[in-house]
Structure formats: C-alpha cells, structure tokens
Amino acid sequence: MGVGSGRRFPRPGPYLLITICVISWTVLVTSRHVWAGDIRLHYATLHALQKNFWSPRDPMVGVVSGSPYYSPYMVVLAAIGKLTGASVRPLVEYAGLFNIALLLVAIRRFCGHFRRPSLTATLVLLFTLTLWGLHPRDWSGFLGLYSLSWQLGYPSVFAAALMFFVWDAFLRFRARPAENWAWADLAVVAVLGALVALVHPFTAINTVLGVVAFALADLRGLLRGRPVRLALVAVPAVAFVVLWPWSDVLSLFGASGEFSGIHLILIRDVVREWGFFSYGLALLGLPALVTGGRRPLGRELQILFGLSAGLVAFGAAIGSYGFARVIPVVMLSLHLALASYLADRETRWSISWITYGTVTVLACAVGLYGNSGGLIRAYWGKVTSADLATWHSRDPASRYDPVISHIHSGDVVISDDPWAGRLVNSRGAYTVVPAWPYPFVDEAARTRDAKTFFAASTSTQQRTAIADRFHVNCVILSHGARTLAVPQALPGFSLKARTWRNGASVWCRP
C-alpha cells in the first residue's frame, strides 16, 4: 500500500501493551535460571518419568507405583524431553513461557463476556498481579506477581489458564438457544475440565465453583434440556480422569486430610490483622461486586464470591484447611467485579467513578510494592541476600548447595534435616522421609526410623539395619561438627564433601 493511501495501522489495544510487559518480565525472570520452592518437586517428577516413562515410581521415596504428580502436563513435558534430549530445568522453564502466554490468551478470551473486553482484561490482569496485600503469600495457584515469579512452569499456572477457557466455553454454551446443542462448547468444557482435574485438582475445585456459579445465575435456562447434554459429555470426561494410567486421582480424596495441616497458614493469613497484609487490597473490589448485579456477569460474580468465600469459611470451621486453596477464586471474583465496574462505559466520568479509580490506582501502587519480590526476580545484575530481604523476596541459595552435587539420580538419602530432601529429590534421588506431605507411604514410620538412625544411643548394628532396609546410599548431615560420629559409627560410609562454614556434610557408600 503506497504512502498517502489513507491506510493506517490500528493502534494497539491496552491488553496488547500489558501483554508485552508481562511477557518481557517472564522472559527476564526465566533467563536468570534461579528457582526455589516446590519447583524441585516438579524436577523430581520429570526425573522419575525419564527413568521409567510408562511405569514410574513415585518421585519422593521411589517405592510406590505411580503418583498424583504424574499428570498429563508432566507426562507431556517428559515426552518432549525424551524426544529432544532436553534436561529437566529447561523443560520446566520453557513450559513457564508457554503457560504465561496461554494464561494471557485465556484471560482475554474470558473477558470477551464483558462490555469492554480489552480494557476489562487489562484491568483484571493488573489487579490479579497486584491487588493482594503488602505481604502476599507465595503459594501454588496464587497468581500475584511475587507468587507467579517462582511458579511460571508449575502445573497450577497451566491449569489456571484452562480454567478460564472452561468458564468461557460454559458461558458460550449457556448463551446458545435451547434448541442448539453446541457440541463444540460442550466438548471444550469436558476435555479441558478433565485435564484440569488431572493437572491440578485444587484448580479443578475452583473451576467447578465457577461453572456452578454461572449455572445458578441462569438456572431456569439451563434446565430446558441442557442437563442431559451436560451429562452426555461429563461421562467420558469422568472416565478419562478415572482411567488415567499414570496415577489414581481418586486416591487424593482419601488422602486429602493428610494435606490439611500445611494449609493452616493460609487460614491464619485471613484472620491475622483482618487479612489485610495478605489479601486486604482485593477488598477494594467489594463495593463493585455488591453493586454490580446489573452489569455483565454481575450476578455470576456475586454467586462465585459467596460460594468460594463460604467454602473457605466452612473449611476453617471444620478444620479442613485444604479449602484455603479456594482463596484465589475469592480474590479473582473481586478483581473481575472491580475491573468490570471501572471499564464500564455507563459508569465513566462520574464523581464516584473518578474517586474509585483514583483509590484503585493508589492500591495498585501499594500492591506493586508488596509484590516487589517478583519485580527483583527480573533483575539481571548481581543480587545479594540483603537485596532480596529489602525487596521481600526469598533467597534461593541453600546451605547444602556446595555438597549436594555428590548426590546422583537414583540414590537413596537419609538426613537429619528433612528439608534437605527437597534438594535431593530435585536431582532425581530419593529420601527415606518424604520431603513434602505424601500420605501414600507410612510417613510416620519412616520419620521414626530416621530419628532412630541419628540418635546418639543407636548402635552401629541398628543404623546398618535401617540403612539396609531403605537401601540408603548417602547420609546428609546438617551440622557435621555435632553429629560427625554418626557416619563414623556406620561402616561403609565415607566423607564425600563438607562445607566448613556451616558444617553440612555428605557421606556415601561406594
């Protein structure tokens, strides 16, 4: 097209601009190759699948066949690794880039149900990244900027993107005339819903809450023959979940109580100082939620907030703290309501809109400061431990880093510090005591044996018997100067490495 033809390139929308910013941040964080937290468990899962793709042992202790962590997400990553020869860390890192791109597309797709889709999606993404609290929690499934900076490659991020696609497909199905069977939308709901259930069961609960809320908001319309259609697609989806060959997802329901205790801290965050430091900034969306019944998806968001907040409260009341994993949907309903109000043409330029918008901008600035630990993750220069503390970010360095290189894939390790097991698992090795809650083995018995192994009163014969029972190859000591006599009293183990600064040491059999 020649100059002067009058043809102009369209101006980029607001969502494209914020997408470029988020993708750039993601690339910078990924390029640092610095990770910590539960990513080690996902490394362990991939290591186990690479050892035996079709029938892997569990990634923690290596004695149970299969594991709930062998989801389609991890199986596909392991298959890509086998085909390309890629190692574990690059697989998870590249998956993180894909997850964020998919999440950005999914949010924009779902926000097509609001009046101003691009602006609403922009605000939703901004609020989801910032409007949490001054000290937001770093937890799987929590999509704040700080939490997300450590979890780009986690299955939970992939599942969150699928959740938005499921919600979008269900709303499109709901909007169809009753005589239109809308098989394409139903297929999306069924297939992606089954994937969410296998990839991240906690996100599956959140996905179901959204579908239930959307159904209740238009229950009369759905009852016109639609339940039959939903049942027709639900049956194969449930069958796929139940028959998934790498794990038994139903076993999670029987073991759910074992995971409850680790979530107590999330409930305490809600009641500690009225929850402000962890979640308080999201309450800014409460007025928009309460008054938004006439806006698009207004009733749906009100029902979703009521269901999710009620479920969290119910779980806290009965001591089932795992329901705290619904908190991200409580937050999301507030973020969506606030974004819908501020993006609505009918509410713009009023005194209340200007005031509300100004307060929201200030709250986002405060939330960005609270999530500053996620910003420094994108900084390429040298970052000291003091810098990380100033920016409210965790230090990924470990006291065991200098000695852990002597642990190899397939080794079985016992340690007087259970936390060291996470580093061990990340290298494809196994531990006597599970490094994460894992109710599929007798964790209490293993813990007792580990304590006996390191007790000063334990005889050499007892230690040898415990080591032989679990096929232990190496011993990790957290303070060599204090417990150095343990491996010396165990014939066949010799010192492989020691850090003189903190006394950590590794002793291995030949």
Image: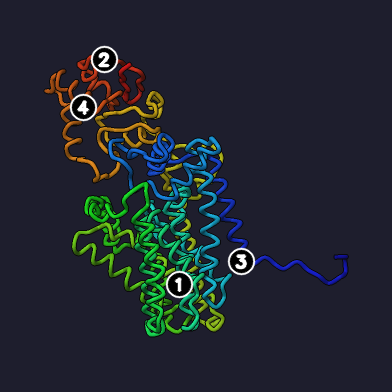
Label 1 or label 3, whichever lies nearer to me, is 1
Instruction: Check disc 4: other Cα within 10 Å, few if <14, some if 14-19, many if 20+.
Output: few
Q: Are marks 2 and 3 in contact (CB under 8 Å)?
A: no
Label 2 or label 3, whichever lies nearer to me, is 2
Label 1 and label 2: CA atoms lie apart by 62 Å
* Labels 1 and 4: the sequence-earlier one: 1
Q: Are marks 4 and 3 in contact (CB under 8 Å)?
A: no
Q: Amino acid at mark 3?
A: Pro
Q: What's the mark number on residue 492?
A: 2
Q: What's the mark number on residue 170?
A: 1
Quadrant of image for the N terminus: bottom right
Q: Is residue 392 above or below residue 278?
A: above
Q: Are marks 1 and 4 in contact (CB under 8 Å)?
A: no
Label 1 and label 4: CA atoms lie apart by 52 Å
Instruction: Check disc 1: other Cα within 10 Å, few if <14, some if 14-19, many if 20+.
Output: many
Q: Which residue occupies 41% across, 79% down?
A: 226
Query: Position of 148 compared to 467: left or right?
Result: right
Q: Position of residue 31 (x, y in %)?
A: 56, 41
Q: Which residue occupies 48% across, 57% down?
A: 368
How many marks the image carries: the answer is: 4
- Residue placed under numbered mark 3 in the picture: 14
Q: Which residue occupies 36% across, 22% down?
A: 499
Q: Position of residue 416 (x, y in %)?
A: 24, 30
